[in-house]
């Protein structure tokens, strides 16, 4: 039995505060119907990465475990309400000899808030190549940003899923950081699940990385206006919201081991920002790629009250 089918006795207690696997937990209501709940990413809306991760978990629950996820494409349609459950309806589009395709619609109060298409395939032997990982400092050499955030914004920190993960930002002037191209802001972040994940369930690893992938892509598109919220002080200067999100999974990995997320944003226009990201493991293997377009609107400063 996969851990995505039922939390195993060997996995961390899903009721324990800070257990990452609890973020992926969904309940099966019918053959193709599941239900979950998501924490807030902003004060009044669910965190999109968790919605996408739970939708992918629902899709994977309907596929033979021998087929691994190789890609996903999602659209964020409406803000989700973190106070209400989310239902995930799975459409079993196709089961071919090598590939299988699923569509998932996330629904709240009768309205679609997110749609996902995911493709699964049987493994096969083939040639390999990849981009070389930049030689940036490792996570052990970098400070933990969460204690300061918990002190500065305890309410934001308490409602988020950040208690369940680890993150380290690589300074822009650190050794090994590639030169930034004009008009292409970039950032490098080490990420991992903060509690152990079951090694015998690849779907859990992929769904965990789906969650992690939505943390810093939109802020990368806004770096020309403001730094990430874990690195800035003062109120936000831009409105950010994920519009669509795509991922490709190239090689097996562990999401509870450190992964370098190398990100850059080649375009911002029309109230939208595009970000590209690549995940590398500690051995320098490129394990996944992500692309996201986000709503990006600069907030006008409010005049002081008389």
Image (cartoon, rainbow, N blue to C red):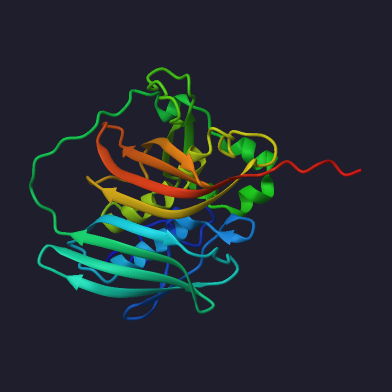
Q: Residue 30's image quarter? A: bottom left
Relative to residue 32, is residue 80 depicted above or below?
above
Q: Quadrant of the N terminus?
A: bottom left
Left or right position of 230 against 55 = right
Relative to residue 13, is residue 29 depicted above or below?
below
Residue at the image point whose x is 21% and y is 64% from the top: 65
Looking at the picture, tell me which residue is in the foreground, 33 or 10: 33
Q: Position of residue 172 (x, y in %)?
A: 48, 23
Q: Quick one: which residue is furthest to the right in this view?
A: 306
Q: Position of residue 283 (x, y in %)?
A: 26, 32
Relative to residue 84, is residue 274 depicted above or below?
above
Q: Quadrant of the C terminus?
A: top right
Q: Position of residue 37 (x, y in %)?
A: 51, 67
Q: Position of residue 138 (x, y in %)?
A: 39, 27
Left or right position of 285 against 106 = left
Residue at the image point whose x is 64% and y is 56% from the top: 43
Count the marks: 0
Determine if residue 201 is in view. no
Left or right position of 13 against 101 = right
Residue at the image point whose x is 37% and y is 57% from the top: 11
Residue at the image point whose x is 31% and y is 57% from the top: 72
Q: Quick one: which residue is furthest to the front in this view?
A: 270
Determine if residue 138 is in view. yes
Relative to residue 82, is residue 299 depicted above or below?
above
């Amino acid at each position: 039995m996969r851990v995505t089918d039922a939390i195993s006795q060997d996995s961390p207690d899903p009721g324990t505060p800070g257990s990452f696997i609890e973020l992926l937990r969904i309940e099966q209501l019918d053959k193709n119907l599941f239900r979950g709940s998501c924490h807030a990413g902003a004060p009044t809306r669910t965190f999109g990465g968790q919605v996408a991760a739970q939708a992918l978990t629902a899709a994977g629950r309907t596929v033979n475990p021998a087929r691994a996820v190789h890609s996903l494409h999602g659209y964020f349609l409406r803000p989700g309400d973190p106070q209400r459950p989310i239902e995930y309806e799975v459409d079993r589009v196709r089961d071919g000899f090598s590939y299988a395709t699923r569509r998932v619609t996330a629904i709240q109060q009768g309205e679609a808030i997110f749609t996902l298409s995911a493709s699964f395939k049987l493994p096969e032997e083939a040639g390999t190549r990849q981009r070389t990982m930049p030689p940036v400092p490792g996570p052990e050499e970098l400070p933990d940003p969460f204690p300061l955030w918990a002190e500065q914004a305890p309410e934001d920190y308490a409602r988020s899923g950040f208690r369940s993960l680890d993150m380290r930002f690589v300074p822009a002037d650190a050794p090994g950081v590639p030169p930034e191209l004009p008009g292409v802001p970039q950032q490098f972040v080490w990420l991992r699940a903060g509690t152990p994940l079951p090694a015998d369930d690849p779907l859990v690893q992929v769904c965990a990385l789906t969650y992690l992938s939505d943390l810093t892509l939109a802020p990368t598109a806004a770096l020309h206006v403001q730094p990430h919220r874990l690195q800035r002080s003062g109120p936000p200067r831009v409105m950010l919201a994920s519009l669509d999100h795509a991922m490709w999974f190239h090689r097996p990995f562990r999401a509870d081991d450190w992964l370098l997320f190398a990100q850059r944003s080649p375009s911002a226009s029309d109230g939208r920002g595009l970000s590209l990201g690549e995940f590398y493991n500690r051995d320098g293997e490129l394990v996944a790629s992500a692309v996201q377009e986000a709503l990006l609107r600069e907030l006008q400063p409010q005049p002081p009250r008389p």
